[in-house]
Image (spheres, rainbow, N blue to C red):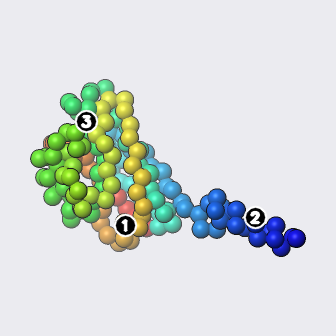
Amino acid sequence: MRVVRSLAIVSLLAISGGAFGADKVCKLDIAGSDAKQFDKKEISVAADCTSVAVTLTHSGKLPAQAMGHNWVLSKTADMQGVVNDGMGAPFAANHIKAGDPRVIAHTKIVGGGQSDTVTFATSALKQGEAYSFFCTFPGHSALMKGVFKFG
């Protein structure tokens, strides 16, 4: 009877995300301001994170149509192409080209006082690869960018 109970407890732990095979969601916060600045220039995520949840908060007061910000992640080598294609994409598409495979993750565009969270699996990332985060609202990426480190 004890063996059966022990197996049942172990099974419940595994199913509920206990010590066996648990996912590790690493949560990050970043803010963008009316001065076209992120409050961080670098973000690091440990290699044992299985997914990342990034919450972007717009700390300013201006509306999204005037001074909106998003948080976009791509390989550093792909950043400028994503930014250029985002300028031609509509506001309703968050200034992200539809189906762009270079975009690893992105939030929606937020205005003053708003926030949005994006969660993505770290299986899309490789240790040692150079990644950047940035805002694709037209004209913002020159100032609103930073380094994303994984591993």
Q: Label 2: state its secondary structure.
A: helix
Numbered label attached to residue 148: none
Disc 3 + disc 2, Cβ < 8 Å? no
Q: Closer to the N terminus: mark 1 or mark 2?
A: 2
Q: Label 3: state its secondary structure.
A: loop
- Dot 2 amino acid type: Ile
Q: Which quadrant of the view contains residue 73?
A: bottom left
Residue drawn at the location 76% of the way across and 70% of the way down: 7
Residue, disc 1: 125
How far is the residue under mark 3 from the one under mark 2?
A: 49 Å
Q: Position of residue 117 (x, y in %)?
A: 40, 45
Residue drawn at the location 70% of the way across and 62% of the way down: 12
Give the label, 3 or 2, closer to the camera.
2
- Dot 3 amino acid type: Gly
Callout 2 crowding tier (Cα within 10 Å): few <14, some 14–19, many ≥20: few
Residue, disc 2: 9
Q: Label 1: state its secondary structure.
A: loop
Callout 1 crowding tier (Cα within 10 Å): few <14, some 14–19, many ≥20: some
Say which of 14 and 37 sits in front.
Answer: 14
Give the label, 1 or 2, closer to the camera.
2
Residue drawn at the location 26% of the way across and 32% of the way down: 64
Q: Closer to the N terminus: mark 3 or mark 1?
A: 3
Q: Which quadrant of the view contains residue 93?
A: top left
Residue drawn at the location 42% of the way across and 61% of the way down: 121
Residue, disc 3: 68
How far is the residue under mark 1 from the one under mark 2?
A: 34 Å
Q: Which quadrant of the view contains residue 90?
A: top left
Tell me the quadrant of the picture where the N terminus can be found.
bottom right
Q: Closer to the N terminus: mark 3 or mark 2?
A: 2
- Dot 1 amino acid type: Leu
How far is the residue under mark 3 from the one under mark 1?
A: 27 Å
